[in-house]
């Protein structure tokens, strides 16, 4: 749609609708992460923003792509998993290493399943329209 076809009032209305929809999508994406208990540090959730200049809802947090799309099987470092097991799962130090090694083995051999929180959020948003 080009601005030349619309008057100033109509163009402002279109911009408001676009901003409202984008902010609703951003909120739904954050809620979807909450519902799926995918919040650990909160970096992915906090990084989801609406960029009005480029007209997109996005995250610049690297890990958000892994949360959305998953990860193919491949070796992963143990230390971040160990820290996650202790902090997120609340596993005691005496058991944390064993649990972290099992998770590391599973990711190395099976990968990480995608959550598709963006896709689900878009589908939820369009169903409500």
Image (tube, rainbow, N blue to C red):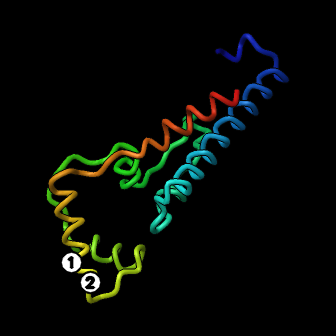
Establish if 124 lies above or below 59. Answer: above
Q: How many marks?
A: 2
Cβ–Cβ under 8 Å for marks 1 and 2: yes
User: Is the residue marked by circle 2 packed among few (<14), some (14-19), or many (20+) residues within 10 Å?
Assistant: few
- Depth check, front residue: 116 or 53: 116
Give residue 109's position: percent from left, percent from top: 15, 53
How far is mark 1 from mark 2, CA to CA? 6 Å
User: Is the residue marked by circle 1 packed among few (<14), some (14-19), or many (20+) residues within 10 Å?
Assistant: few
- Residue drawn at point x = 63 percent, y = 28 percent: 126
Give the number of the disc on residue 117. none
- Residue drawn at point x = 56 percent, y = 39 percent: 121
Kindly identify which residue carries mark 2.
95
Establish if 50 lies above or below 55. Answer: below
- Residue drawn at point x = 36 percent, y = 54 percent: 62
Query: For residue 77, what is the image quadrant?
Result: bottom left
**As drawn, which residue projects farthest toward the right?**
9
Name the element at disc 1. helix
- Depth check, front residue: 7 or 46: 46
Q: Is residue 12 left or right of residue 106?
A: right
Kindly identify which residue carries mark 1.
98
Establish if 93 lies above or below 66. Answer: below
Give residue 32's position: percent from left, percent from top: 55, 49
Quadrant of the rendering where the N terminus is positioned: top right
Query: For residue 100, what is the image quadrant?
Result: bottom left
Q: Is residue 9 left or right of residue 15?
A: right
Give residue 80's position: percent from left, percent from top: 28, 71
Give residue 54's position: percent from left, percent from top: 54, 35
Name the element at disc 2. helix
**As drawn, which residue projects farthest toward the top?**
5
- Residue drawn at point x = 46 percent, y = 68 percent: 41
Quadrant of the rendering where the C terminus is positioned: top right
């Amino acid at each position: 749609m080009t601005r030349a076809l619309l008057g100033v009032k109509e163009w402002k209305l279109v911009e408001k609708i676009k901003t409202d929809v984008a902010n609703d999508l951003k909120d739904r994406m954050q809620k979807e992460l909450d519902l799926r208990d995918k919040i650990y540090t909160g970096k992915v959730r906090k990084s989801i923003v609406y960029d009005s200049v480029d007209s997109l809802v996005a995250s610049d947090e690297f890990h958000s792509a892994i949360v959305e799309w998953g990860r193919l099987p491949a070796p992963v470092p143990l230390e971040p998993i160990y820290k996650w097991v202790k902090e997120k799962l609340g596993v005691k130090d005496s058991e944390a290493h064993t649990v972290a090694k099992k998770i590391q083995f599973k990711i190395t051999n099976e990968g990480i399943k995608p959550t598709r929180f963006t896709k689900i959020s878009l589908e939820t948003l369009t169903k409500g329209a």
